[in-house]
Amino acid sequence: MNSQYVVAKFGGTSVANFEAMQRCAAIVHDNPDVRVVVVSASAGVTNHLVTLTQQKVDAAEREALFQSVMTIQQDILACLTLDTDLQAGFNDTKEAFYALAQLPALDAQQCDEMLSFGERFSSYLFTQVLRDLGVTSSRFDVRQVLKTDRQFGKAVPDVAATRDAAMAHLTPQLSEQVVVTQGFIGSDNQGQTTTLGRGGSDYSAALLAEAIAAQSVHIWTDVVGIFSTDPRLCHKARPIARLSFDEAAEMATFGAKVLHPATILPASRSGISVFVGSSRDPHAGGTWIEKNNRSEPGIRAVTQRKNQILLTLKSPEMLLASGFLARIFTILSAHNISVDLVTTSEISVALTLDNAPNATRPELAQACLDELGEFCQVSVENNLTLVAMIGSEIQLRHGEASLMQVLADFNIRLICHGASRHNLCFLVEQGESDAVVQAIHSRLLEAA
Ligand code: ASP
Ligand code: MG
C-alpha cells in the first residue's frame, strides 16, 4: 500500500535564485503531504561543473569556474542566515569543492564528486528557505540511501538496496518533518559519490518516491506541464492534461526535455502518479501521468532530439550468415552505449545514438568504433535530429493518408515505425528539423 506521501522535485530554474526558491518553499508549505523535497543544482551550476571536469581547463579557468559557481550560491546566501548545522555543512562542502577544483586532472570517480556539488549546495540553501517559512525541515544526504553501481557519469541505481536504505534511514524521519535532499547523485557500495547522468534529478525523485512508497511525485519545472511540442517553437503548442505511462516514457525518451527519460520507470513499476507543473505558476495546472490514463488513438505530441549520431555498419560477408547483429550489440553493450533507433538490411544495420552537449561522458568512444571496424565498414554521420510523433495506436493504415502526406514533404534519412504503437520516429538534417516539427504540429496537432 502506498502512503499519502508526496515527493516534490524542484529543477534548476526553480531553484535558480532566492526568489525562485521562495516560490518553491511556498509550494511545499501549502501541501502537507510533501515529505521529501529533491532539489537540483541552481541553473547553470552543473554546466560549470562539467567544464571543470574537462582535461583542457587550466588553473586560471578552474579558479574562474569555481568563482562562477560560488557567486550563484552566494547570491542566494546573501538573502539568508544559515542555521549553525546548515552553515557548518555548507562550509565543509565549499572547502571540499575548492580542494577538488585545484586538481588539474580528475579520474571518473572524482568527476562525479565534482558534479555533485551543485545539488549539495542547493540542498543546504533550500532547507533554510523552508525553515524561514516555518516548515520543520532538515537536510538529508541522499548518498546514504540512493545506491548505484560504479558506472560513474551514468550510474545505474540499485532499486532493492535503495529501498532498504530508505526504509532504514529516510522513512522514519518523515512523520516529523520535511526532508530536503539532492537529486542526480548517489553512491556506490563503497560510499563513493556517483551521478545518474544529466537531468537525473527527476529520476532520483521517482526512485525515492518508489523507495518510500509515495503516492505521487511532483516535478516542478519552468513550464506548466508536458506540451504537444516545444512552445518556443510553435506558439500553438498546448499542455497535455493527462498522459499514460507509455506515452510519457516515449515523450521523455524522444526529446520532450521536461522529464528525464528514466523517470517513468519507477513510477509505472510502482503505480506512483507523476505530476509535472510550473513552480512559477503552481495553480496553472500541469500534466498528470497515471496508471489509469487511457488515451484516444492518434498523435498527441511531436518532439525532437538534436545532436544525433547515425552509425551505419556494413559487412558484405554477412550475406546469409548469422550473428551479425549479435556481434554488433555485444560490442555496443560492452561500451555501455544505448541505441535508440535501429533499421537493418541483410548486410547492414543503421542505428542512432544520442550525442548531447555537456553530457557527463561521450556516448561513442573511439575504442568502440575500432572494435566494430574489425569486422565491418563503419560510417558515422552527425548533425541529425530525431523527430518523433508520439501518441496511441499510431498506425500507417490504409485510409490514413495524412501521416504519409506530411512525411512526403521532408528529406528523411531513416524511419522507424512498428515496434511500438506509441511512436513513429525519423531522422532529418538538423538544420531542417525545426521546420519539420512546426509543419507536423500545425498539420496534425492543431487541426485536431
Ligand atoms: N543538475 C543536474 C543537471 O543539470 C541534474 C538535474 O538538474 O536534473 O543535469
Ligand atoms: Mg531537468
Image (cartoon, rainbow, N blue to C red):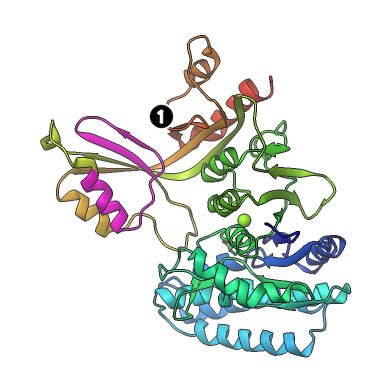
- Residue 86: which quarter of the image? bottom right
Q: Is residue 252 visible?
A: yes
| Residue depicted at 41% across the width and 78% down the height | 106
| Residue depicted at 70% across the width and 38% down the height | 242
Q: Secondary structure at mark 1?
A: strand
Q: Residue furthest top?
A: 399
User: Is residue 221 depicted above or below 446 in this figure?
Assistant: below
Q: Is residue 118 visible?
A: no
User: Is residue 230 depicted above or below 195 in this figure?
Assistant: above
Residue at disc 1, CB closer than 8 Å to ligand 2: no
Name the one closer to the observer, 288 or 93: 288
Question: In the rendered image, which residue does mark 1 sit on?
Answer: 415
> In the drawing, does residue 24 fall left or right of residue 342?
right
Name the one closer to the observer, 283 or 436: 283
User: Is residue 111 depicted above or below 385 in this figure?
Assistant: below
| Residue depicted at 56% across the width and 67% down the height | 163
Q: Is residue 340 magenta?
A: yes
What is the quadrant of the C terminus in the image?
Answer: top right
Q: Which residues are magenta?
A: 326-352
